[in-house]
Amino acid sequence: MRTIKLVLQYDGGKYAGWQVQDNATTIQELVENALGTVLQEKIRVSAASRTDSGVHALGNVAAFKTSNPFPLHRLHRALNGILPPDIRATEIVETKEGFVPRYAKEKTYRYALAFGEFVSPFQRRYAWHVREALDFGAMQQAAEAFIGEHDFTSFTAAGGGEKTHVREVYRFEFGAGGVISACLDDKDICHFDITANGFLYKMVRNIIGTLVEVGRGKIAPAEIPKIIEAKNRALAGPTAPPHGLCLLSVKY
């Protein structure tokens, strides 16, 4: 059996997330079906991140096993020929047996915010539009409290099924531009990039929702350590919408 690693990009706007579901179309379903068509065998694909409904990816890593000796360069072309245009494999390589995508050293997510009265029509699918003025200095100050190893119970959602809520955030950076940069209108778009050894269910979106409340003046930056320590979801802010979130990269 060969173990094949994929790097996937996708616009998650019209999909019910990564994981196969009975009554909705998902990224995993389409990738498995396309690979099965080419390789003429049932394929099961696992991913580094089971992105939620509406969430995008520029670098989700996946893997599958196959007994078919089909050449990888032909598989790459055939797979992208079958997949819809909003899902693409950017890399296909054979990797060592036992490779498990979810066992990553770090993952980086970007969340994009659009501010001001209007949002560019080219960015509306990839940024949360917040019309009111935000205090980005306060938001950056608050973001620093998340760096380090913490129990993130206050920022997870029910249904994740994780055995522990302890995660380590390595970096939390603020910058101009959105998920789609350089080629589209970045005016009035900014982002937060968060890198950690792993993430809980809806953790990034709950953190961003809390930071927006900081930017609105409803939560003081000094309150963030207390919210983390309380391990109480009710004390944190709302869940940010999914379309502003993108998985940028996974490292091993």
Image (cartoon, rainbow, N blue to C red):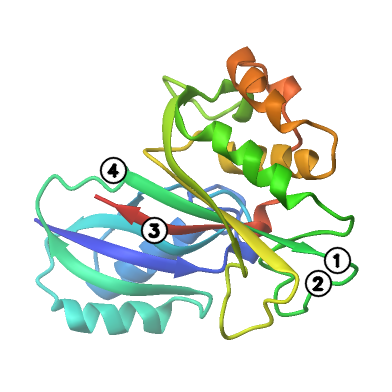
Q: Secondary structure at mark 1?
A: loop
Rounded to the nearest angstrom, the CA distance separating label 1 from label 4 is 37 Å
Dot 3 and dot 1 residues touching (CB under 8 Å): no
Above or below 119: residue 208: above
State the residue at coordinates (13%, 44%): 98
State the residue at coordinates (71%, 24%): 223
Rounded to the nearest angstrom, the CA distance separating label 4 from label 2 is 35 Å
Q: Amino acid at mark 2?
A: Val
Is 219 on the left-hand or right-hand side of 149?
right
Q: Amino acid at mark 3?
A: Ser
Rounded to the nearest angstrom, the CA distance separating label 4 from label 3 is 11 Å
Q: Secondary structure at mark 2?
A: loop
Q: Nearer the viewer, mark 1 or mark 4?
A: 1
State the residue at coordinates (65%, 37%): 142
Q: Residue beneath label 3, please?
A: 249
Query: Residue 221: x, y in percent?
Result: 71, 32
Q: Earlier in the sequence, mark 3 or mark 1?
A: 1
Q: Residue beneath label 2, please?
A: 119
Q: Amino acid at mark 1?
A: Gly
Q: Nearer the viewer, residue 243 or 146?
A: 146
Q: Quadrant of residue 203?
A: top right
Q: Quadrant of residue 246?
A: bottom right
Query: Residue 212: x, y in percent?
Result: 76, 44
Q: Secondary structure at mark 4?
A: loop
Identify the disc placed on residue 105: 4
Q: Earlier in the sequence, mark 1 or mark 4?
A: 4
Identify the disc placed on residue 116: 1
Above or below 169: residue 54: below
Is 26 on the left-hand or right-hand side of 140?
left
State the residue at coordinates (17%, 76%): 72
Above or below 180: residue 143: above
User: Residue most toward the top?
Assistant: 230
